[in-house]
Image: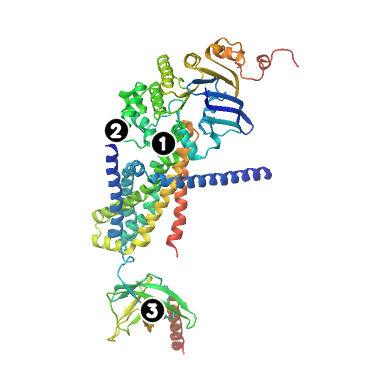
Amino acid sequence: MSNLVEIRDLEFGYGDRKILSNLRMDFPRGKLIAVMGGSGCGKTTVLRLIGGQIRPQRGQVRVGGEVVHELRTDGLYRLRRRMGMLFQFGALFTDLSIFDNVAFPLREHTDLSEELIRDLVLMKLNAVGLRNAHKLKPGEISGGMARRVAVARAIALDPELIMYDEPFAGLDPISMGVTANLIRNLNDALGSTSILVSHDVKETFAIADYVYFMSAGKIVAEGTPEELRVSTDPYVKQFVNAEPDGPVPFHYPGKSLGDDLGLGAKR
Amino acid sequence: MILRFLEVAGRTAREGVEALGFATRAFFNLLRFSPGAFRRPSLISEQVHFIGNYSLVITIVSGLFVGLVLGLQFYVNLIQFGAEEKLGSLTALSLIRELGPVVTALLFAGRAGTSLTAEIGLMKAGEQLSAMEMMAVNPVQRVLAPRFWGGVIAMPVLAAVFSAVGIVGSYLVAVKLLSLDEGAFWSQMQAGVDVNRDVMSSIIKSFVFGIAVTFTALFQGYNAKPTPADVARATTRTVVIASLLVLGLDFVMTALMFTQ
Amino acid sequence: MHRKIIDVWVGLFVLLGAAAVLFLALQAGNMSSLSFTDTYVVTGRFDNIGGLKPQAPVKSAGVVVGRVGDITFDDKTFQANVSLDLDENYQFPKDSSLKILTAGLLGEQYIGIEPGGDTKNLVDGDRINRTQSATVLEDLINQFIYSKAAEGKDGSE
């Protein structure tokens, strides 16, 4: 199975602050891969590097064989037309209607007639269940619905690669289930490759084919959901079982409580 | 002590120059993507509508009041010299040369400028501009450039309307209220106002102000931090910086255009 | 359609602006410096042009018949060389004379052209020889003071 996206020896940081180090990841075609970890572990940064919004200090990101950060603007834009991205909380254009939001990539990148665009947009909205809401504006629908519209917009051009940045954040259980199903079904129906960045264990494990676990910019574990559920790695265990304390400490590092309260032997 | 002061002064100066350079680069970047924006004139005309039409009411009302007040103030002073027939000429020149472009620009900064800054700032905070980039659409070309040209086109129109309405206001005060001779009012005005020197330079001034104010508004919005608090601060910065720029540029242009 | 309505409003907006500019140009201002009539150039030499500036009016019988063009200094004759752009519609005899006058007491200076009696008219490139320089206020005041002082001397002798 060939890889659509390959990450090798990736290092990325701002000045002295390292965000990602020594990253190696494979994203095979047609699969749904999850990148998970606590807040601030660098998962969204990985998506940004794949999309070419930032450049690595060392290492390579290859998409479809091309090294992303070596592409010039037109090459990068051509590559991005083959990708769809769902931003956290949707990032819909607030001044456009839902219909125009989904039609945006079609109008910008294709020469299709308005009738054809109308049919395509309504079909995409139908896939996410919001066809009848197409006249509304993003301010008039709930967060969960906005997320689904954003999914419709991300798949408007039937991309080969779809990236989801925290698609479950802030959703109620029903919406979460709906979104998770949508992500899986779309991946299979379109034959695309999906990369899912999330920290929601239950929903992600239900739909992912393979999972990468990150902590502090490094991969600490990887495997299929079944393998990770029974893993003995302390970090994976803490995360999967939602334990409050473990490799990721509960207390912010610093002095101990005894020292702060002045207890213990006088020095 | 002195060393500390020099250190801070030096750093502030360097940061200021750096900021100026950053702004200049952003300006040229905006110009670079403008031809692309002109290929979609509907985007620009849409912005002219949002920026210009929505500022019309405040411009007309302000112009009227300024014209009324000018008429009254000049009359009170001119009547002492028996020169009240110069009223039309003086109010027209004040409006066309200075008040029209400058006051309109200040109002524009307050109404349209803050609205642009907030709009762009919120779009950036909501990752809409990032999303657009990921969809292989250049946000400078699609979002910023149309707004820039919309503002640049709208400003001279608004300034001309302000001056015209102001003159009508001073006419109402002079002829209707103070019973000055209508013929003398208009003929003295026409003798005093030269199209080449006064009306043309008024248009040039408002064009330059349009560039300064609109660019400041877009720049502040684009570079605000993506939090609601900073977007609000950015709108304040827009008004302050744009107003100072307008007044400063006004001085420079007046010196260039009206002195030998 | 949403877009069409916006276009109408924008069109009205721009029309309003154009109307305002036209109003300013026609009703509030004068178009005198924007004359599109053809002109012919005539020159005159003056000992002193005073405060005469380019674009100042050239009037005859109080009516504007042209504009001052370039003003240069001739360092052979040490005089000012003034070129006048006269309206094609107005012809003046070859022996007309030029005077530098002041509008009002302290106003802007302009050139008055007084017709002579010649049957032939000025053509493009001609030079007018009969010129009267500007009255410089300082000279007038000096004259007045000296004449008053002379009167005083005469009176006391």
Residue sitting farthest toward the front: A1
Per the image, label 3 sits on a secondary structure element best described as strand
Return the x and y of residue A1 as percentages of the image width and height: 52, 22
Query: Tag 1's secondary structure?
Result: helix
Distance of mark 2 from mark 1, alpha carbons? Answer: 31 Å
Mark 2, residue position: A115
Answer yes or no: is residue B223 visible: no
Instruction: Point out the image quarter for the N terminus of chain C.
Output: top left
Q: Mark 3 = which residue?
A: C43
Q: Is residue B29 left or right of residue B14?
A: left
Q: Nearer the viewer, mark 2 or mark 1?
A: 2
| Residue A23 visible (yes or no) | yes
Q: Residue furthest top?
A: A230
Q: Chain of mark 3?
A: C
- Residue hosting label 1: B119
Question: Amino acid type of disc 1?
Answer: Glu
Between B162 and C1, the one lying in front of the other is C1
The chain under label 2 reads A
